[in-house]
Image: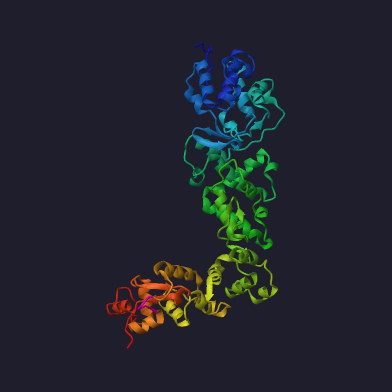
Amino acid sequence: MTTLFPMLPFIDDETPLSWAVRQAAFHTRGPVPAFLQDLGIPLVALARGDEQAVRRLCEKAGHDPAAVLRNTISAVGPRRYRLRGLDFAAAFTCGPVTRVCPACLSKDMAEARYSNAALRHRLLWKLAPVRTCAVHGIALRDLCAGTWDNLAGALQAVTALDVAGQQVRDVVRTVSPLQAYVAARLEHIAGPAWLDGQDIDQAVRATEMLGALDLFGPKMKASEMSQDMWDAAGRAGWPIVLSGGAAIRQNLMARVTSSRGKRAAPRAVFGMLHTWLSSHRPTQNPEPIRDILRDVIVETTPLSKGQMLLGKPVTDPHLSSVASIARAEGVDAGTMRDVLQMAGLLDAEDVAQRSNRLVVDYTVARDLIDIVKHAVPVSCLLTMLGASHALVELLIEIGQLQLVRGQYALASKIGKAVNGQRVKPILRLLEARFPLVEEVPKGFAYLSRAAEKSRAEAKFILEVMFLGHLKRGYRVSGAHGFAALVFDPEEIQALAESPPPGLSEASYFLIS
């Protein structure tokens, strides 16, 4: 296969497209689109980092493709790219903007053996967070923006400019720590653990967003930020992210504290950081900064259970209004105010306002709320379980029912009650264990009569029943719960005379 001659070597800091532009100028003195077309290489394919296009260019140029592929930014999905094993969103690159260092281009021209193929575009200039020349310590410039054709011809267009003599004052500055981190990570050099644990573009964006919030405040919009402002934001964010998640959380909590008197909404407190992380379709993977911000908001902002927050529903709000809590828990708002007063979260004056907008600590009240939701007065159990008052007392004594004994229970409207969550399981057990019959089988008796005939305590009968030792029993149609149960007194007496293990003390004595 015919190769280009003489060879124009690839320089290890440039991009494949830069090399193609230089070869077009060197071999044809013409634009790169026509040059690539003659070689059978689609410009768009080379610009997107298609491996076959890069290899074909190397083959035509007689060059080892390894170094060229190492500097190839390849498309790997919709607006997703990869460079040296690192994946990132399209926004991590400059896109069709040609960013350059004027001093580097002047140096290219001064040292060129072939002036028409001197100017090269450095790989790092293609990355959005790279805004300062590491060699000359000046801000990079964005020459033009447009289509890929404009990008491809941009460096050739610079030959018509006297770059060194442009009447634009250079911004002198050192490379930011964040830019240095990006360059080092491309060389697979380890950096701060919190940053290394996420995609490179996400690490950069989180740092810049935190810095922008710290430097410019929550009213600043991303669309109003210049490249110099983003550079400053990266510098301001670096100390925040350097120590990891705990330091970031502390920084965000401090912002809430400073605005607490105004009870500001999260968007007002966290500005474009909140806007970015609220995006339904972020081009970057927003973890872990989104989780940190979400936890801060949950801990400091009144929320409703089930409310969507930064892409996830709130399952465990810390602060909430009376109305939100009552709605989430299915409890009357008036009752909820009484409960919150008992918990010490509202005073009598608050309750007297009858306002459902009052904000309280949901986590402190949660246990008491659970009691309210499931508490069943003992008087109601008589019907629910088909049991006498004495039988309910025995069920509480043997632990099958739990009496509500919270520190607020006796002072509340709950009164003497039990946890109703146990009622249905007990009824299901009776239905599963004892068959339903139309009439009482011969020799069987209802619970109280069976206790008399067997000369066993009712407590003993209940315990052996729940332990599964009582095999002969039925439910008689027409009654409900314990009122429907009939047992064999002889079986009960036999168990009482030879008690099985697991019974409480003194529960199986025979009646004298």
Query: Hey, which residue is sitting farthest bottom in the picture?
Result: 512
Up the image or down, 190 lies above or below 358; here it is above
Residue at image point 52% right, 51% down:
245
Up the image or down, 497 lies above or below 219; here it is below
Dominant secondary-structure state across the stretch colored magenta: loop
Could you say where residue 252 lies in the image, as x and y percent from the top left?
59, 54
Residue 19 quadrant:
top right
Residue at image point 55% right, 24% down:
16
Side of 213 where 8 appears, left or right: left
Tell me where the magenta segment starts and ends, as one range.
441-445
Side of 251 where 398 appears, left or right: left
Residue 99 quadrant:
top right
User: Would residue 156 be visible to someone looking at this image?
Assistant: yes
User: Would residue 115 be visible to someone looking at this image?
Assistant: no
* Image label count: 0
Could you say where residue 75 lies in the image, as x and y percent from the top left?
55, 31
In this view, the residue in front, 432 or 257, is: 432
Up the image or down, 156 lies above or below 494; here it is above
In this view, the residue in front, 291 or 474, is: 474
Q: Is residue 211 magenta?
A: no
Residue 31 quadrant:
top right
In this view, the residue in front, 292 or 249, is: 292
- Where, quadrant-wise, is the C terminus in this rendering? bottom left
In this view, the residue in front, 140 or 91, is: 91
Could you say where residue 437 lies in the image, as x and y percent from the top left?
42, 71
Query: Hey, which residue is sitting farthest right in the picture?
Result: 167
